[in-house]
Amino acid sequence: MATLSQDDLKTLVGQAALKYVVPGEIVGVGTGSTVNKFIDALASMKHQIKGAVSSSYASTDRLKALGITVFDSNDVDELSVYIDGADEIDGHGFMIKGGGAALTREKIVAAQSRQFVCIADESKLVKTLGKYPLPVEVIPMATQRVIRQFRAMGGTAQLRLSDGNPLVTDNGQHIVDVTGLQIADPLGFETSVSQWPGVVTVGVFAYQKAQVCLLGTASGVKTLTF
Ligand code: 5RP
């Protein structure tokens, strides 16, 4: 059998996620290259769903281009399912997210959903969160203070740039990426960093953890439940 590339694995899990989409309902849609595969697959079901709530302008544009109606999260009550990728996921369904800078809207839509189905290739599965640089969305005025607070915890934090300038999120804020942390207690970490003045969202998803992970592996899609 030919070896599957990372892109192939993303396609497989994107397609596998279709079975969690409830006909007649609105689906929560995340952001990133894996979710793009899901959105492309979702086009085959577009006449069976009411539409989607999206976690970024990028996903909204892709959904609309495929003829899928996108609703504002404020106009929709609870969603049955939210489908999104992750930068890291551990054996409890806790995740690091925000590599695509969409973490705040992702957390909002995840919080609005009864079930979080994470789609990821097997490179994302870790024992302990923290190898992938942790994204934290911050109000620009607080950037240097937040960087110092992470330094005091033993991490190294830096402002994320795009074309040499600070990256600006869909919410008009900045992102700090933190390396050198081992996040052994994701719930405690998320609780604590979320209180820091100027932090909009920390990219640890412990309260909004995944209940299911569709993991793309060399031998096919594995379903992990938490
Ligand atoms: C975007 C995210 C993505 O889910 C995460 O970065 C994974 O992306 P990809 O599927 O491209 O690897 O959190 O903010």
Image (cartoon, rainbow, N blue to C red):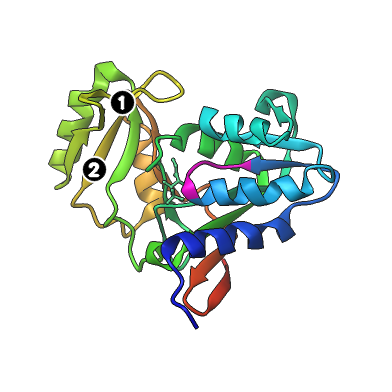
Residue under label 1, please give it.
Answer: 167
Q: From the Cβ of disc 1, is ligand 1 less than 8 Å away?
A: no
Q: Position of residue 148 (x, y in %)?
A: 15, 32
Q: Quadrant of residue 224?
A: bottom right
Labels 1 & 2 near each other (Cβ < 8 A):
no
Magenta stretch: give its range: 29-33
- In the displayed image of the protein, which residue is found farthest to the bottom? 1
Q: If you read the primary sequence from the N terminus, does the residue marked by circle 1 or circle 2 appear first? A: 1
106 in magenta: no
Q: Position of residue 109 (x, y in %)?
A: 60, 37
Q: Amino acid at mark 2?
A: Val
Q: Position of residue 41 (x, y in %)?
A: 66, 52
For label 1, the crowd category at 10 Å Cα-Cα, with few meaning under 14, some 14 to 19 and many 20 or more, is some
Q: Residue at x 46, y 71 (%)?
A: 4
Residue nearer the viewer, 125 or 19: 19
Q: Main secondary structure of the magenta part?
A: loop
In this rendering, the answer to whether 86 lies above or below 112 is below
In this rendering, the answer to whether 151 lies above or below 5 is above
Q: CA distance from mark 1 to mark 2?
A: 15 Å
Element assignment for label 1:
loop
Q: Quadrant of residue 46?
A: top right
Q: Residue at x 14, y 47 (%)?
A: 154
Residue under label 2, please give it.
Answer: 178
Residue nearer the viewer, 151 or 18: 18
